[in-house]
Image (cartoon, coloured by chain):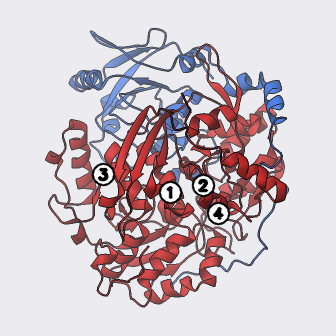
Chain colours: A blue, B red
Amino acid sequence: MEKFTTHTGVGVPLRRSNVDTDQIIPAVYLKRITRTGFEDALFAAWRGDESFILNQPEYKAGSVLVAGPDFGTGSSREHAVWALKDYGFKVVLASRFADIFRGNSGKQGLVTGIVSQENIELLWKLLEAEPGKEITVSLEDRTVTCGELTVPFEIDDYVRWRLMEGLDDIGLTLRDEAAITEFEGTRDAWRPKTLPAKTLPKEEIVAARPVD
Amino acid sequence: MGTTLAEKLWSDHLVKKGEGGAPDLIYIDLHMCHEVTSPQAFEGLRLAGRQVRRPDLTIATEDHNTPTLDIDLPIADKTSRTQVDKLRENAKEFGIRIHSLGDADQGIVHVVGPQLGLTMPGMTVVCGDSHTSTHGAFGALAFGIGTSEVEHVLATQTLPLKPFKTMAINVNGTLPKGATAKDIILAIIAKIGTGGGQGYVLEYRGEAIRNLSMEGRMTICNMSIEAGARAGIIAPDETTFEYVKGRPHAPEGEDWDAAVEYWKTLKTDDDAVFDTEVDLNADELEPFITWGTNPGQGLPLSADVPSPEDFAEESDREAAVNALEYMGLTPGTPLRDIEIDTVFLGSCTNGRIEDLRAAAAILQGRKKADNIRLLVVPGSARVRLQAEREGLDKVFLDFGGEWRNAGCSMCLGMNPDQLKPQERSASTSNRNFEGRQGKGGRTHLVSPLVAAATAVRGTLSSPDDLEDAPAALA
């Protein structure tokens, strides 16, 4: 993962609350087996609308999304993070994020900064008054700067450290492999295992057919 | 001071306490995989030269994009077929048990785990699917994860996590006739909002919860995520033990006794303190439905479509304006007057045998309204077999409905079961997001009883609205 310290890019005001991951990327785009190439799927349903913010030329190159509360609710699909990243977003700012989305973002190097709703409103006004205006996000200082305005954002200390160091989670956990093995040795024997597989007797499943 | 159930499960699975702001390392007892959120995780393992640490704690099935018709033929949609083939290849390469389309144990992961007896009290359960919270109904700590975390669990059988906050949801009183577990959870989400549970494990408690079957408890825990919660949990009791006993992977003999002895300790101490408590009185509940485009936009069926001015918060007003426009609804319209095109009975929320029985009891001897398409999709192949043994398939077919093979189906419209633009559904699933059931489709979330009554009348209805309302209602 790339290290993240500071980013400056075009801010995109998305005046919507409860942007769920079905809006960020509809399910029909989840059938790919790659981890990249999802940029066309981002906000797919809204991209068809000419007035949608990312269809306005000034915002097209956006890399800092400023969204309403409860961003990323619903489905756990990490594709939502991949789509935002593939489009070019490095940061999402909102007053509240859904937990799974925020966790997924942290794993993928997308910064999710929690900014108070009052400050989100200020950022929206600045970005709408001057479309294409740039925002600077400093992970080091935990600040967002837009013109004369500088506001703080919150992010978990550990996630911030990992993003700034660009560290891979699995590698970190595997340093504790001995502790995992030791823990496994303490488990009760009756705890279920999927193997060897046990099932009720096999039965034939009849395929349903289309009705006319 | 005592501890809550969720905290007990946390400490029971603590491999290593995090220091200096680092997360705790938590052991995972059961990891379920499906075709949509796993391919990139397996690819990650392959690229890093890593193995699956515990194939014997991992299981896979095919559910999200699989067709519910012609399942004996190659999957017509090429990208879906590729994804399913990829899961089969990955399962083979990494030695993971898989229940594929056509197998009697295939179905929605959250229906399959409990029915195999793999979901038990006291476990940690994860899956790359937000509705993993379903398994909390057994007194397990169960939550959805993203694909990076799927890879993490495959490689290490653990997850680095910060402790969740705890919220008690006390549902006291007795559910009136015609109100169900689905109405409880829709009312809770409307009360605390789609972000109300963020960072929390919700522990559902109280008389109305104790009186629910395991199916009803699963419906409630399933939708915890729609309130933004990490997980939902219900302390195990005799109802739970009875459900688990005798299932294929349930412990036997002395193991069973040892397990039950442990399971009986799994409850919140009397002197434990939750970070937050919410109360709901079940006595006053009536059938609940959603009118908008997030699961928090719900009202009793007897209400009218709300107006944006009814909301105090600016963001709620804006959300209501957007929702009303998308849903094509006019404020002041009685919800009961809303005409429906498709009724979807199924999903990990309400696709279990009890849900099908409840709906069939209402549909028995009736015919569908002319404007209605009824799609019945059992949650698993075993549910389908059981329903057929009970003759429920005949009830649905005689009524004019379609009887399909198992899968997620129209809940998320990844397979051909989708709404057309502006088509309106009454759906027993869990999400009414824009386009969730098909681009431009409009979803009203309902209980199986409301779904059935709606299929009879053609407008949003409860069983009480039917002439000769059936006497034996759940």
Decide if residue A76 is on the left or right side of residue B176: right
Q: What's the CA distance linking mark 3 and mark 4? A: 33 Å
Q: Which mark is residue A93?
A: none
Q: Amino acid at mark 3?
A: Gln
Residue visible at 51% across and 77% down in the picture: B357
Q: Which mark is residue B237?
A: 2
Badge nearest the viewer, 3 or 1: 1
Whether callout 3 and callout 4 share a subunit is answered: yes
Residue visible at 40% across and 78% down in the picture: B373
Element carrying mark 2: loop
Along the line of sight, the residue nearer the viewer: B155 or B335: B335
Residue visible at 74% across and 40% down in the picture: B154
Please name the residue that numbered disc 1 is placed on. Answer: B210
Image marks 3 and 4: residues in contact by CB distance under 8 Å: no
Please name the residue that numbered disc 4 is placed on. Answer: B243
Q: What's the CA distance linking mark 2 and mark 3? A: 33 Å
Please name the residue that numbered disc 3 is placed on. Answer: B297
Badge nearest the viewer, 2 or 3: 2
